[in-house]
């Protein structure tokens, strides 16, 4: 299915191409002859099983208006597809809303009417936020540590989206059909500060949950930790990081730059939220990635090779003891063993090389919020 996968690469998370890419994704989402768009999926409020019945092969199987083959249904049994749909919808719609936001004039917010671009786009984003919130409340409400981390990050993303809606249009809920009567730049800032403070708290909750995960995992369950950090990076960290960057872009439009951290309450609140997220990313980088070998000459790599080789031999001695003499006496057996261990050790080395650039880039960018007036 067609997705906003480009938003999951750091090189395209922010910059002048954001709006071009977002508009292209929206335009293509209604193309019947293209792959089904996951953004459209985010508009439906139904169970996972019901969603699966919506999608079918959209190739033309007709001859003179007669259908010659039965359409194939593609069931969506994986929760990740639905989660991705909501993520992509929020990423695209925040970019579209910020693109039409207007800077205040002489300290007053710019008024708008029903049907204006900013009105239709904020309604669309608020609608997606309501659907995403309903989805996350069902998906991350059971007591599991990994869900605590991902649920907290989901909440941060929704709070940031609310902040964008309030600052750009004065509205934070789909139930608000019009701008509140007391709408002003001051009231908008006050509401933004409250939401960003909640986002800051959620970042700390996610960090505590991650520390608990690391403290409880068994040494032989390290693969699960690697899988988990890959999922959290793609499904949670990168989208939240991107939304913080989009929020900062909107703040800059309102002349609330990062250097006003100590003089503007909203800027300070956004900085605290960004730095709390950075603390979580730094903790993940320290506890997992820095524990992986950076090269094949690294002492950690040699240690992995030694431990893995010992583990393989111990496993074979307990399950296939007849194979041990072959490994000890045969050059070919020793070569096969070294290859297996080498592939396994290289996996950890390659994993660090693939993930580390994302973490380092996010750490560097979020550190720019740590500035004085």
Image: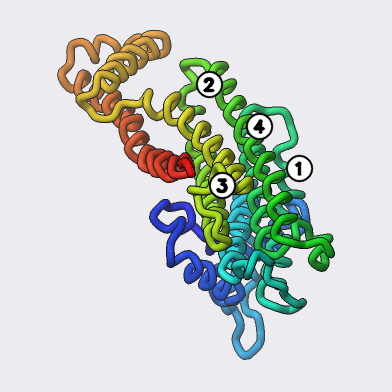
Q: Alpha carbon of mark 1 to alpha carbon of mark 2: how far?
A: 25 Å
Question: Mark 2 sits on what residue?
Answer: 214
Which comes sooner in the sequence, label 1 or label 2? 1
Q: Alpha carbon of mark 3 to alpha carbon of mark 1: how far?
A: 20 Å
Secondary structure state at the residue bearing disc 1: helix
- Where is the N terminus found, in terms of image quarters? bottom right
Which comes sooner in the sequence, label 3 or label 2? 2
- 38 up-or-down from 350: above or below: below
Tell me the tag on residue 148.
Answer: 4
Q: Is residue 328 left or right of residue 177?
A: left
The percent position of residue 163, horizontal first and vertical second, equals: 66, 53
Q: Alpha carbon of mark 3 to alpha carbon of mark 4: how far?
A: 15 Å
When asked about the image quadrant of residue 121, the answer is bottom right
Tell me the mark number nearer the camera, choosing from 1 and 2. Answer: 2
Secondary structure state at the residue bearing disc 4: helix
Tell me the mark number nearer the camera, choosing from 3 and 1. Answer: 3
Secondary structure state at the residue bearing disc 2: helix
Residue drawn at 26 percent across, 27 percent down:
342
Residue drawn at 29 percent across, 20 percent down:
300
* Of the pair 293 and 32, the residue shown nearer to us: 293
Question: Mark 1 sits on what residue?
Answer: 138
Q: Is residue 148 left or right of residue 9?
A: right
Residue drawn at 51 percent across, 53 percent down:
257
**Colour setting:** rainbow
Which comes sooner in the sequence, label 4 or label 2? 4
Tell me the tag on residue 207.
Answer: none
* Of the pair 176 and 43, the residue shown nearer to us: 176
Question: Mark 3 sits on what residue?
Answer: 240
Which comes sooner in the sequence, label 4 or label 1? 1
Q: Residues within 10 Å of mark 1 (few under 14, many from 20)?
A: few
Which comes sooner in the sequence, label 3 or label 1? 1
């Amino acid at each position: 299915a067609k997705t906003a996968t480009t938003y999951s690469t750091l090189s395209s998370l922010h910059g002048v191409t954001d709006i071009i890419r977002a508009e292209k994704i929206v335009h293509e989402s209604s193309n019947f002859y293209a792959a089904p768009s996951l953004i459209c999926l985010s508009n439906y409020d139904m169970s996972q099983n019901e969603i699966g019945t919506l999608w079918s092969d959209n190739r033309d199987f007709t001859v003179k208006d007669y259908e010659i083959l039965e359409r194939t249904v593609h069931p969506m049994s994986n929760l990740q597809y639905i989660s991705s749909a909501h993520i992509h919808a929020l990423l695209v719609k925040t970019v579209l809303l910020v693109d039409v936001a207007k800077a205040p004039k002489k300290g007053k917010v710019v008024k708008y009417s029903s049907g204006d671009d900013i009105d239709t786009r904020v309604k669309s984003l608020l609608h997606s936020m309501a659907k995403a919130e309903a989805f996350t409340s069902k998906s991350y409400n059971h007591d599991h540590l990994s869900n605590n981390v991902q649920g907290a990050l989901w909440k941060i993303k929704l709070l940031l989206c609310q902040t964008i809606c309030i600052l750009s249009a004065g509205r934070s809920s789909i139930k608000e059909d019009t701008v509140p009567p007391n709408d002003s730049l001051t009231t908008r800032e006050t509401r933004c500060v409250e939401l960003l403070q909640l986002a800051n708290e959620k970042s700390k909750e996610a960090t505590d949950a991650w520390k608990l995960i690391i403290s409880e995992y068994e040494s032989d369950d390290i693969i699960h930790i690697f899988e988990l950090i890959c999922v959290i990076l793609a499904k949670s960290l990168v989208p939240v990081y991107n939304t913080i960057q989009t929020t900062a872009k909107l703040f800059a439009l309102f002349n609330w730059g990062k250097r006003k951290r100590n003089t503007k309450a909203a800027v300070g609140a956004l900085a605290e939220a960004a730095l709390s997220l950075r603390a979580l990313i730094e903790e993940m980088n320290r506890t997992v990635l820095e524990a992986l070998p950076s090269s094949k000459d690294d002492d950690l790599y040699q240690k992995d090779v030694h431990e893995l080789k010992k583990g393989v031999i111990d496993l074979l001695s307990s399950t296939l003891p007849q194979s041990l003499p072959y490994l000890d006496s045969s050059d070919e057996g020793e070569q096969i063993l070294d290859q297996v261990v080498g592939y396994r050790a290289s996996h950890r080395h390659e994993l660090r090389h693939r993930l580390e650039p994302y973490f380092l880039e996010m750490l560097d960018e979020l550190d720019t919020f740590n500035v004085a007036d």
